[in-house]
Image: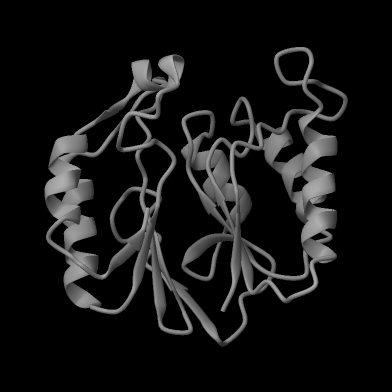
Amino acid sequence: MIFAQISDLHILRKGQLAYGVVDTATMLAAAVDHLGRLPFAVDFVLATGDLVDHGTAEEYAHLAELLAPLKVPCFFVLGNHDEREALRATFSREGALVMHPVPASIRAEGLEESGYLQYTIDAAGLRILILDTVVPGEGGGALCTERLRWLRAQLEQHSGPTVIAMHHPPFDTGIAHMDSIALKGAADYEQVVVSFPQIRRI
């Protein structure tokens, strides 16, 4: 089982450039084309936040158009540039935030259970936990008691190899402007993570 990760797509309305200079749509189209030409099969794609730049329905529609050539499911993680309800309205299906049908070999579920955009993906013995770190209107993220309770419950239910997918880094990156926005609750998150040896990647 192989999955690809892409992140910080920052898709805008057609014809717009991110920060006035970056053609994110063309870059994403090139990435999708590259994924389709890999010499091995990718089972699904994981897009880990900042999918669009302003969280509008028009931007999500443009994102869907750019991802249409993918032959496999693309699962989404919420980022601080995203908007919960617009993202949910565009991509909520089959217990997940996903584009393209999910095959029987992959099970996704739990999207509506926590109140946040969090869910699980199970594929070939690997569990991926999609964690919502967004605080509406803020650049920085947070992991509150409720979200950490959900995370711990998922980890207690499944002892096999696990990946946690989240947008905000739970550690210093060395990039000053990234570290300045940070992730509230990172220390509490660390206490959860160190308790579960099945976590292979974050």
The residue depicted at 85 percent of the width and 37 percent of the height is: 26
Quadrant into which the N terminus falls:
bottom right
In the displayed structure image, the side of residue 9 where residue 136 appears, left or right? left
What residue occupies the far front of the structure in this picture?
A: 174
> Vertical placement of 111 versus 20: above or below?
below
Q: Position of residue 117 (x, y in %)?
A: 40, 50
Q: Position of residue 20 (x, y in %)?
A: 77, 12
In the displayed structure image, the side of residue 76 where residue 111 appears, left or right? left
What residue occupies the far bottom of the structure in this picture?
A: 104
In the displayed structure image, the side of residue 106 where residue 112 appears, left or right? left
In the displayed structure image, the side of residue 41 where residue 188 appears, left or right? left
Q: Position of residue 13 (x, y in %)?
A: 78, 28
The residue depicted at 47 percent of the width and 30 percent of the height is: 80
Q: Nearer the viewer, residue 154 or 116?
A: 154
> Vertical placement of 64 versus 163: above or below?
above
The residue depicted at 59 percent of the width and 43 percent of the height is: 7
Q: Position of residue 197 (x, y in %)?
A: 20, 67
